[in-house]
Image (spheres, coloured by chain):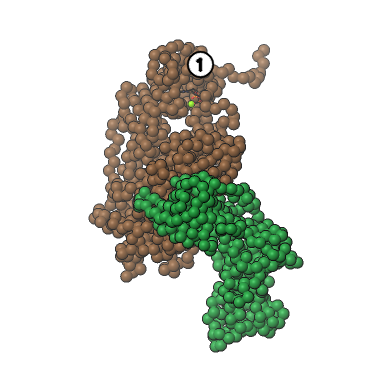
Chain colours: A green, B brown
Amino acid sequence: MEFVVSKREFMKALGRVQSVADKRSAMPVLTNMLIASEGSSSLRLAATDLLISITSHTAAEVRKGGSVALPARSLYEMVKNLPEGEVHVTIAPNYSARVSGGRRRYDLVGMPGEDFPALPSPGQTELRDIPADALSELVGYTSFSMSTDDTRPHLAGALFEADANILRMVTTDGHRLSKAEKQMTEQGAKLSILIPQKGINEIKRLLDEIKSEKSPDGLGVVSLGRAGSNLFVKRDETVVAVKLIDATFPPYAQVIPAASERKARVNRAEMLSAMRAVSVVASDRSSGVKLQFSRSKLIISSENPDLGAGTDEMAIELTGSDLTVGFNSKYVMDVLSALSCEDVIVELSGELDPGVLRIPDSDEFVGVVMPMRI
Amino acid sequence: MKSLPSIALLPPDVANQIAAGEVVERPASIVKELVENSLDAGARTITVSVDGGGLARLSVTDDGGGMNREDLALSVVRHATSKIRSAEDLFGVASYGFRGEALASIGSVSRLTLTSRTADADEGWEVRLEGNASPQVRPVGCAVGTTVTIEDLFFNTPARRKFLRTVQTEWAACADVVARLALPRPNVRFVLRKDGKTLREYLRRDTIAERVQELWSDDTLTSIDGYRGSVRVQAFLGPPERARSGTAGIAVYVNQRFVKDKLLLRAISQAYGSTLDGGRYPPGAMLIEVPAAQLDVNVHPQKAEVRFAQQNEVFSAVLTLLRDGLATAPWARSLVGAPTERARDDGWDARFSGVPYAPAPTHAPRPYNLLPSDLGETRPLFERPRAESTDAETPERSVITAASETADEVDPWGLAGASIALRALPTPDTSVVPAPEDAEREYSVYSPAVSLPSDVGLPERTTFASLRFVAQVRRMFFVCETDWGLVMLDQHAAAERLVFDRLRRAYALRDVRVQPLLVHETLEASAREVALAEEHRAALESIGFELTPIGPNTLAVRAVPALLVRADPRRLARDVLAEFARQGSDFSRALDLVLATMACHGSIRAGDDVAPEEARALLASLDDCDFGGHCPHGRPVVWSMKWSELERKVGR
Ligand SMILES: Nc1ncnc2c1ncn2[C@@H]1O[C@H](COP(=O)(O)OP(=O)(O)O)[C@@H](O)[C@H]1O
Ligand SMILES: [Mg+2]
């Protein structure tokens, strides 16, 4: 096998896939990435940790077709250190690769491409186009409240639902829940899947790359769909496949309070900074902060028997009677920092009933946080 | 003409005598049965009187629950027991007795008198059994509790009498049995009388460690206390040079029952590795606890054998905990001098010495592969800086033990003689062996019985906050730097210790913060677990749990302690219930263990990536806790090495 490729294009493709290659895997082949020719002007690059697989393409001048598996991390580092311009790669019959650019040259031991595990493919499944900015918002509004405990798979991921013209993402770690929805103008296929935490992270990375392109036409679309036990997310030449969680997400609708006795409108940035300031006193992440809501002000305070106390207050508008309630400050701050609106609506009933945070005049976001008894 | 004998049921008296052959070999076996009955009856004080080696007269008096008239009459009938009702009950037996044959058997080979009074009765009752005559019951005045008196043992079975040894030997055996039974029951007072004189008294103690100290006053025993899964192991084991051939010097208990279990004995000898020859055992005791449901005790008439439902798990738990624990013993530390051996074993500086780096399966050093040719090295690899001040002049360590002079002095398991035989340790320089009293004084440790190696913990004026965090290695340890040396911390153990302390403090202040769950978790539970959750509802709430039965076999977790929000509520609840089950209903006793279990869940684990900021925050908080260099289960957490030591190691 032999090909010539521009360093810049090659680096982009390598960067996309190499992070998935599993550095700690017990299967040596998984620390590699696959490079295979497709026709005379394109290369396919792929890596997998068996949970996530990423495939990307790049234009190249293929002089001799074939495929090879090369150590992902090392190849990436080598190409990075070559001078700008063209990179020339030749694979010897023993699968050792010579990678050269200018007068620099590396030799790298490889394996036959056939040894690389077969990657999931969407086959004939039709993918649905959705705006990348909508997907990015769904992820941003919800990813912070997934559980990080992989032994509880039903919580360690995000529920993604697509109805005819609505997209929804919901996450919960058992203490709090976030739900985000986006109205779609175009109709599409229905879907209800549970995406593991790692998959969400990979989707985030893909979206970040799209954002970094800073195209004047906006973020464009990504196509997405399920085939078998995998979710496929495709953008241009890159396909991310994520092995879905086979578990039942808790019945989230039951958890979201239908009505509330009190409603407060609070400046988001002000509340976030007050929460941060006051929780300095809390001995660790689990110590709660106390929120005292009254007609026109909110007092936020925290007490730590070993250290002292801290307090701050701000003007708010409250409908309903006064109420004092305790929260794990991290849970509230996570919601406040995920949003970007000017004000937030805080809905409360009793001191032991779940609190709800929303964007004013919008149904796009609901954050539910269970209070703490303090 | 006489016909050939045909099969016939034995008359009950003959059956009793045969059974007596199994249960009653000698006075000591009677003492065992009677004291066990007293313990089963909830006695707080038990007095054992032995006259004429127990052959003339033997009595056991307790202040337990006693028996009413009916029960008293029934108690001497074979297979009459109040402790189990059906065959199913045989699993999970918590009492010592359950066969209901001891009193009947003893009565069939002696003159037996039982007097007993329950707390709510005005008078007591007495029943007398003489050989096979039918029992007589009559009212008597007596204190609440029970007294069993045996006179003229084996008066009707002369053959048995012949097998008995001297009065002195029989007395010593009785005294041994009492000591053996007293060991796992520190909260019971035992009085031992011989021919009218009180010779021994074991006072009520809080911990087994204190009882062990009282029994043996032996400071060469290494204390070990830890958990693995549902197995708890407590052990007090002597150094290998005091090992003796055979098992007479070692006492093994399972769920407070003294047993002779080959599996557990093998675990002990394996834990000592090559320092023990086959068939030799160190002096001391080991107590293990497993969930009662996983133990079959009905294997042996004297109940000396047990069967584990999960024998492999038990074996490996015991072996690992003993190995880890023994690694900290002063004798083990002085034996591990050979630097290459040691380096390879804990994989810590192997990279510098060119030895292929192979992570050990556990992080605990296994210091037992001592090669005789390696004895030249005399200092341990790690050393606490202040250990330098230990007296280096003493060429060898000698232990002087008062020999048992008077014939009346009882030495349970004959240990006194053994400790005289302590040889100098096989290293020319023993200055690195810290006096155990010294170690004990210096640190406050959660488990008072843990003996500390020289380099565990931090020197007095070093605070955890002052440690400069360098790196996390193997996702298991923090490596830190100080002005005087290098400090390594076990991340999980340290985090666990911190959470434990916070939980304990919050509990003491009645300020346990509770995080109710938004999404309730349900868990399948046994009827017993459901009952436990109900019975201990208030106690569970006081530590931040809300567990509600929502079906005969289902519990809902509705709230967890806020400190443990990271943990899986279901597994947490299950482990806490298991701990309650193990501890019985005495919550105050269970508290620390329950909190330790909880802390384990809420903590950074081995294998977790820890960001530098998080590591620093953890270090900074450790100074506030009653740390003592150990995790709540008693494992050491910190190791340190002086720069000078490191420089010497690398030949500077
Ligand atoms: N010291 C005692 N205090 C109260 N009850 C006793 C005592 N000793 C024996 N008993 C009663 O007598 C019964 C029979 O005792 P025993 O023959 O030793 O059988 P087991 O202990 O196996 O039940 C016991 O179940 C118990 O109810
Ligand atoms: Mg009994």
Residue A359 rendering spot, x and y as whole percentages: 56, 58
* Residue for badge 1: B70
Q: Residue at x 47, y 23 (%)?
A: B160
Q: Is residue B2 above or below residue B101?
A: above
Q: Position of residue A50 (x, y in %)?
A: 63, 63
- Element type at mark 1: helix
Look at the picture and state if B356 lies above or below B247.
below
Looking at this view, name the residue that lies furthest to the right: A124
- Up/down of B92 relative to A314, above or below: above
Work out whether residue A15 or residue B202 is closer to the camera in this orientation and state it: A15
Expressed as whole percent of the image width and height from the top left, the position of residue A48 reads 62, 67
Answer yes or no: is residue A368 visible: yes
Q: Nearer the viewer, residue A62 or B313?
A: A62
- Position of B72 with respect to B44 (left or right) is right
Which residue sits furthest bottom? A103
Of residues B100 and B392, which is closer to you in this image? B100
Q: Tag 1, which chain?
A: B
